[in-house]
């Protein structure tokens, strides 16, 4: 029988379903949303699965993308039925949690140094050793935006505790000459916590923050030269997780191994970073290989004498030749 309690629950479920559909249908085949009027600030969604603020300003007369509106606060925003991506577009498609959990390992400490993010506070840190499934603060999950290239990054710990925190950066402008540590934040727009992957040498990857164009990096503290006669044991500072502008990145510091190895959606390299130590040896090896392919194996211009040949055996043929010509 339909008791009043059952009727109320059914009505509540129906309202919730309709509300979700009004926010974003989520269909993969949905086209770009069309809108010709601005939306109210009260309609801004901060749900990371469907952020409606593109992160792009339209203040001062600068325009928004096609089918994107400029609201009263000077922000390019999507309508109620669409979600923003990091490029400033609006589509009626939700962001999607990726099935695979990943680990980010520094190329400077292969197989040893992995990025972890303490729950609910502080910047990311380096943990030594491969994170197991139980090390939830070192196992990362990716929320892929509807542009299919930009991702929001959070840990397994953070996702399932529902704290809404993602890897991000402080509000700009940021000093291009400084190393600035990432932060944990609740994204208010589609660019604030969005990252894209770029290819790096040796089948590695780089993570570039969309809003600031800064690269995630690891600063490894090493002893620079030791006088063995007067060497004393010293404790080095722990490696630091930070970010860098392209021109300020340290060699190899922005390169990462992503485990388990898989195919990831990447974008072309936007900036050229300083070569890592392992890149220089690869360049030299490639040059030698190409030179050999063009010129072929080089032979000496003279024929080396056989092993054990005496000086007399080498001179006799020459004297015979002289006597024949005289």
Image (tube, rainbow, N blue to C red):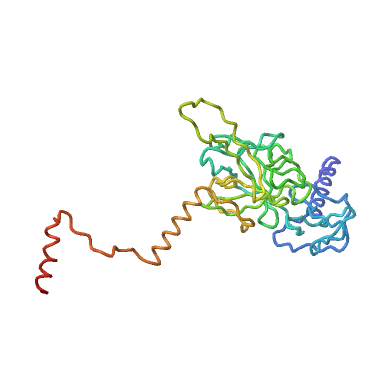
Badge count: 0
Left or right for 270, reference 312: right
> Residue 42: x and y, percent?
88, 49
* In this view, 40 is above or below 36: above
> Residue 269: x and y, percent?
61, 57
| Residue sticking out furthest to the bottom | 325
> Residue 174: x and y, percent?
74, 46
Residue 28's quadrant in the figure? bottom right
* In this view, 229 is above or below 255: above
Residue 183's quadrant in the figure? top right
Residue shown at the point (70%, 50%) measured from the top left: 194
Left or right for 64, reference 233: right
From the viewer's side, name the closer residue of 104 and 178: 178
* In this view, 79 is above or below 229: below
From the viewer's side, name the closer residue of 90 and 222: 222
Residue shown at the point (25%, 64%) measured from the top left: 302
Residue shown at the point (38%, 63%) measured from the top left: 292
Q: In what quadrant of the picture does the C terminus appear?
A: bottom left
Residue 153's quadrant in the figure? top right
| Residue sticking out furthest to the front | 326
> Residue 102: x and y, percent?
59, 44
From the viewer's side, name the closer residue of 284 and 200: 284
Q: In what quadrant of the picture does the N terminus appear?
A: top right
């Amino acid at each position: 029988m339909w008791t009043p309690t059952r009727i109320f629950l059914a009505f509540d479920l129906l309202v919730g379903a309709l509300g979700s559909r009004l926010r974003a249908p989520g269909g993969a085949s949905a086209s770009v949303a069309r809108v010709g009027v601005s939306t109210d600030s009260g309609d801004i969604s901060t749900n990371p699965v469907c952020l409606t603020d593109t992160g792009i300003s339209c203040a001062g007369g600068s325009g928004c993308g096609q089918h994107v509106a400029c609201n009263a606060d000077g922000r390019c925003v999507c309508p109620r039925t669409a979600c923003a991506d990091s490029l400033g577009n609006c589509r009626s498609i939700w962001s999607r949690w990726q099935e695979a959990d990943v680990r980010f390992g520094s190329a400077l400490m292969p197989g040893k140094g992995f990025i972890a993010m303490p729950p609910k506070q502080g910047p990311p840190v380096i943990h030594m050793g491969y994170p197991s499934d139980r090390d939830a603060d070192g196992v990362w999950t990716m929320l892929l935006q509807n542009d299919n290239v930009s991702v929001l990054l959070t840990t397994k710990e953070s996702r399932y505790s529902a704290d809404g925190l993602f890897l991000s950066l402080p509000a700009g402008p940021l000093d291009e000459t400084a190393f600035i540590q990432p932060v944990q934040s609740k994204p208010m727009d589609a660019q604030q916590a969005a990252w894209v992957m770029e290819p790096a040498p040796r089948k590695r990857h780089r993570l570039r923050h969309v809003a600031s164009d800064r690269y995630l990096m690891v600063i490894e503290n090493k002893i620079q030269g030791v006088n063995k006669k007067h060497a004393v044991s010293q404790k080095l500072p722990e490696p630091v997780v930070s970010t860098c502008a392209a021109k300020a990145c340290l060699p190899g510091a922005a390169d990462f191994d992503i485990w388990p190895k898989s195919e990831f959606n990447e974008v072309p390299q936007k900036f050229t970073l300083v070569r890592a130590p392992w890149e220089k040896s690869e360049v030299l090896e490639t040059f030698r290989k190409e030179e050999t392919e063009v010129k072929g194996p080089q032979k000496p211009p003279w024929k080396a004498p056989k092993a054990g040949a005496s000086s007399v055996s080498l001179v006799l043929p020459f004297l015979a030749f002289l006597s024949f010509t005289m």
